Amino acid sequence: MPSSYYLAELCAAEMREAAARKPVILLPMGSFEDQGPHAPMGDYLSAAKIAEKIAERATRDGRETYVAPVVPFGGEDFFGYMPGGISLSQSTLRAVVDDMLRCLLRHDLTRVIFINGHGGNCGVINDATQKVWLERQVIMPSFYLWRVAQDLLPGIIGEEQAARSGGHGCNPLTSVVMHLFPDLIRPEHIRAARAPSDVWGLPVTGFTSLAIGDGGTITVPLEGGDTVPGGVWGGDPRLCSAEMGAQLVEKLVSIGSEIVRHVTDYSDPQTGKAIL
């Protein structure tokens, strides 16, 4: 077993030895923004912790896996209203991701999986990994934790409970943090979402969307502070729990370790090219 699952904790000699074995490398990404008044702003903490658990399980199952340093600042979207929050422009984030991949590919470290915890990162990851595919026929999958966790919720707590508790500032992220980092949750700030008022004379249907006409929706260049005061949207965080979080994390780690298995089984060990 390795001395650590974190690349940052390996010494140079260990890293050279590990690189020669062509391990899987997880690239965790998240954001530093409003996650609801009760939750830590850094959802990258959860992405990094889940990546560590995936690496531990995959390595235990015989597929050597490491976690690269987390990218804590997400792609800029509609959370710039949050004091103290830090995000990267989409062009800057793209340059960061391209440079990370360039460094890994230089040494033929091609078995890369993104462990993503922020919707604003999705487009950049897709474009950067598509470039790698077109140039080298290497597939680098992205595992968007919260989208998958949202889909898993009904199977854990039922359709009705999932609908009532799911959304920004509530499930799945709040339950996951309650499980992974219980001391970082502030129970005194947990409250139900406020029903948003009309904005620009139209009903709010999302952070940047408004209803118009008979069933129509438009996207507007607003921020969450204009449309969803308090950062909680779509669900009730009072329905979240550490128990739900534990079940979600277990399923996410299981799926993540299966992605590792697939990446190792369906890529050429010498060239890294995907076996289709």
Image: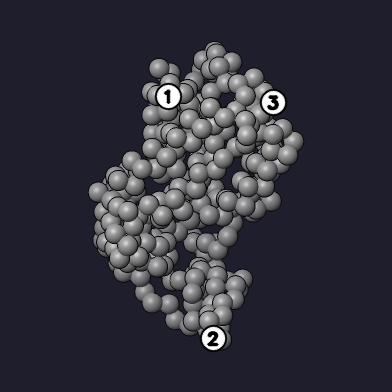
Q: Give the left or right position of residue 182, taking residue 127 as reference.
A: left
Q: Mark 1 or mark 2, which is nearer to you?
A: 2
Query: Could you give the CA–CA distance between mark 3 and mark 2, rounded to whole angstroms?
Result: 54 Å
Q: Nearer the viewer, residue 39 or 274?
A: 274
Disc number for residue 59? 1
Q: Look at 65% across and 33% down and name the residue there.
A: 138
Task: Give the residue pinned by disc 2.
Answer: 214
Q: Give the left or right position of residue 11, taking residue 219 as reference.
A: left
CB under 8 Å between callouts 1 and 2?
no
Q: Nearer the viewer, residue 202 or 271?
A: 271
Task: Give the residue pinned by disc 3.
Answer: 106
Helix, strand or loop at mark 3: helix
Above-or-below relation of 7 to 141: above
**Quadrant of residue 136 in the image?**
top right
Q: Look at 32% across and 53% down and name the residue there.
A: 155
Classify the position of the C terminus by image quarter: top right
Q: Position of residue 108 (x, y in %)?
A: 66, 24
Query: Could you give the CA–CA distance between mark 3 and mark 1, rounded to whole angstroms?
Result: 24 Å
Q: Mark 3 or mark 1, which is nearer to you?
A: 1
Disc number for residue 215? none
Classify the position of the N terminus by image quarter: top left
Q: Look at 45% across and 59% down and name the residue there.
A: 34
Query: Could you give the CA–CA distance between mark 1 and mark 2, rounded to whole angstroms?
Result: 54 Å
**Quadrant of residue 47 in the image?**
top left
Helix, strand or loop at mark 1: helix
